Each structure stands twice: as C-alpha cells, then as structure tokens.
Amino acid sequence: MNISIIGSGYVGLVSGACFAELGNQVVCADNDKKKINGLKKGIVPIYEPGLQELITNNLKNKRLKFTSSIKDAVKAGEVIFIAVGTPALENGEADLTGIENVARNIAQNMDGYRLIVEKSTVPVETCVWIKKTIATYIKDKHKFDVVSNPEFLREGSAINDFNHSDRIVLGVESAKAKQIMTDLYQPLNRPILITNIKSAELIKHASNAFLATKISFINALSRICDRVGADVKEVAQGMGLDNRIGRHFLHAGIGYGGSCFPKDTEAFITIADKLGYDFQILKAVRNTNDEQKRYVLQKIKDSLWIIKDKTIAVLGLAFKPNTDDLRNSSSIDLINALAQDGARIKVYDPKAMEKAKRVLKDVTFCKNPYQAASNADCLIVATEWNEFKELDFRKLKKRLKRALIVDGRNIYDPKLLKKLGFTYIGIGRGNE
Ligand code: UDX
C-alpha cells in the first residue's frame, strides 16, 4: 500500500519504518526541515533499538522516503497516518493545534479518496473534529474515511511492540475503512479488535491510565513496606502470580515519567472533568506519583543529613532504559531538586548524555559509572539500564567517599550490598 505518515517523531518514525519493512511504500513527513534532511541521509534523531537499521535498509530499497512537504505526503499516500505531537497545555488539556493543521492540509491537498488514521494520543471526539475539519476545507468532493488506530508502543522496545503487539485496535465507521486497515495489518498476524471510533479513542486513554494506576499502587505500597519492614519486590511477585493481576508494571521506583503517562493521565483527568466526572482514582494516581518523587528525595536527605556541598553520583538519566529520551524523566527531576539544595552532581547514562547536556547545567558528565562514583558521598541508580545491574561493587566502593547506594529502581540485592559494606537504601525494601 501507499502510506504517508505525518509527524516523524517516535510514533511516526517507528510506524513508518515498520510499515516499509512489511513491504509498503511509505512517505514520512515532518515540518522540521533539519530533521527531514538528516533522515534523508539516514541520520535518525532518536535512539531506539533497531530503528537505525530499519531506516537505513528501507531508504536503500526505496520503500521509505522523507519529505518536509505535507502536500507531497498527502498526494503520495492513500492511507495517511496523523502522528503529530499533542503536547500538554497549561491546564492539562492536549494541544490539538498540530492535528487541526494537518487535517486542514490534508483536505486542501487531497486528489482522490483518502483514509485518514488518527495515531496521536488524543481526547475522545478528536476524530469527529478531524472529519468536520476535512469536510470544511476540502476543495473537490473527494470521499474520505477517518479511523482511530491508537498506538501502544513503548520506547526502548517500540519495534518489537509494533510487530508483536498484544492487540491492534481499529475504530472504524465504514466497511471500506475496515477492509483497508485489516489488510494493512494482516501480515503481522496479531489480534485485531474492531470498535467504533470513540471506543478506540477511549481504549488508549484507559490503557495508559490503568498502567499508571498499577505503578502508583505499587509505589504507595512501597511506602507501607518501608514502614513495616516488608520487601515490595516480594509483595509484587506474590500479587503478580495471580493471573487476574499480572506481574507487569508492578515495579516500585522513583515515579513514572516519559512522554506519555504524565501527560496522558493529566489529559484524561481534564477530559473527565469536562464531561462532568470527577476522576478521583486518576487524580490519586497522579498525586501518588508526585509524592513518590518527594519521598525518594526525602530518603536521600535522611541518609545524607545535609545536602549542601555533598557530591552525589546519579546513574541513569533517561526516563527508562534503552532510550535517550529525557522527557518528564524522574531522574532529571531528582537531580534538579538535589542541585537546588546545593549538591554537586555527577552523572552518567549509557545513551542520554548528549541530550542531557542540553537540559542539565552545572553537573559533571562522566564517562562511566566508576568515574561518576569517584569521591561521591552517595550513588543513586535512577534508571535501570542493564549496564548498572552488573557493576563491580568492590571497585565502586573504593571510588566512593561514602559507601551509600540509593537503589531507585530496586535492581540490587540488599543483603549482598550490605555484606559488601554498603549502606543500601531501596524503595520499599524495608528501610524507611
Ligand atoms: C507507555 C505505554 O507503555 C505505551 O503503551 C504507550 O503507547 C506510551 O506510553 P513508555 O512511556 O514508552 O510507554 O514507557 P513505559 O515502559 O510504559 O514506562 C513509563 C514509565 O513508567 C517509565 O518512567 C518507567 O520507568 C515507569 N514504570 C514502568 C515504573 O516505574 N514501574 C513499572 O512497573 C513500569
């Protein structure tokens, strides 16, 4: 099929590269000319495992093209995915300016039937607005359909998620749209759920809100564990073995971050408010996440007493492993809070250092975990990169001024570290 993707961010690039790999002709568009010029040469602006290879291969075999002209993209694709950003406004609502712009551009440049697919995370009823906008600005009376096809890609495993997703959700209104979309996804051989458009839009919000709820639940539980001397990892394991609960997304830590959960929960709360429903559970989820960040900070303060002039090493800057994305990273929030209290911060991340140099001022960027630990009063693990799971603790201990580890992601065995002479502070491991 001829597919165009408007918006070449995480979702757009991954989807575009994966559709090309499946044998489709794909055009990815973005109004950021610099980004597009780079992509034409195979320069991928984000780190996502496997993406560089997919883009290079499909550029070479000419199944993947890049353009900064939305007009060209609209002409090229019978199926047009909208994957532009929907950043949060001050009041928590999603900013849909980008979506409206694209819808208008599509309307003005259509030269025949088009299937417009909403991929960005958007409030319920956005599809209705896309339809209205296209109908208002369309020049000739070409036919079109609008489909909601929410994405569930996780950064760091996005390509695998695309190819092996638990489900593909298609919110459709016409038989033609249903046929085209099922044909497009059929090669993946994954379960396809056909719903009406509004249900599909809600499924995306509901899924992310529910996952965030699981995380806040386990984070709240971690605080109880600390008080009573239980281990949240054991509790999570015991809960997770019940199939009705499941073991995923029950890892206590320094609070969820990233480009989706904080923004999407906020947007869903606002959507519900507008609909006249006070979404108290979700408000508690958001508040628990904010609280968790303060709780971790307090734990560090309780161990170091005075933060001012202490040297603190932070391992991990990205909001999760296997990505260089720093958006809403809880690690960055923690660093900023510690720096504000006068700490000297040394940092290391396997992939996010370049991006971090743009957002972190007055910190020392180190080449590896040991350099970061050198002369530090405390070592914090803020992102659970595999590289940090296998550190040489003896070497680390020699470098640290004080053998204090704050394991913000619960990746270490507290008993082992204590045996090696460290003071170990985990999250919900029984040490408030
Ligand atoms: C999320 C959804 O998982 C994905 O389906 C959606 O399409 C986009 O948003 P992503 O933000 O890439 O994906 O990462 P995810 O793996 O979901 O992690 C989000 C945050 O939650 C990270 O900060 C992570 O560290 C945190 N997290 C996750 C926990 O603290 N504990 C957990 O058990 C799981």
Image: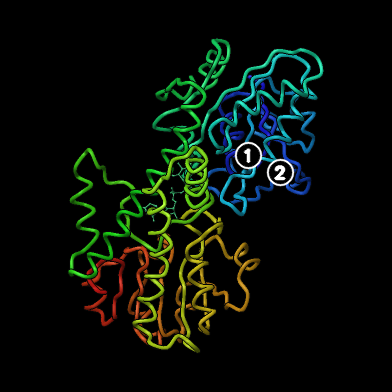
Is disc 1 surrounded by few (<14), some (14 to 19) or many (20+) residues within 10 Å? Answer: many
Q: Is residue 56 visible?
A: no
**Residue 118, above or below 89:** above
Which quadrant of the figure contains the C terminus? bottom left
Circle 1 SS class? helix
Mark 1: which amino acid?
Ile
Can you see residue 277?
A: yes
**Quarter of the image where one finds residue 19:** top right
Quarter where residue 380 is shown = bottom left
The disc at residue 39 is 2
Q: Residue furthest front?
A: 276
Circle 2: residue type: Leu
Q: Residues within 10 Å of mark 2 (few under 14, many from 20)?
A: many
- Horizontal side of 230 relative to 291 (left or right) equals left
Residue 328, relative to residue 18: is it above or below? Answer: below
Residue 55 bears which disc, if any?
A: 1
Some atom of ligand 1 lies within 8 Å of the CB belonging to the residue at label 2: no
Q: Nearer the viewer, residue 357 or 259?
A: 259
181 horizontally vs 287: left or right:
right
Q: Quadrant of the N terminus?
A: top right
> Cβ(mark 1) to ligand 1 < 8 Å?
no
Q: Secondary structure at mark 2?
A: helix
- 1 or 43: nearer the eye? 1
Q: Is residue 139 left or right of residue 404?
A: right
Q: How is the image coloured?
A: rainbow
Picture coordinates of residue 280, whole percent (x, y): 38, 48
Name the residue: 54% across, 79% down: 340
The answer to whether mark 2 and mark 1 are in CB contact below 8 A is: yes
Numbered label tally: 2
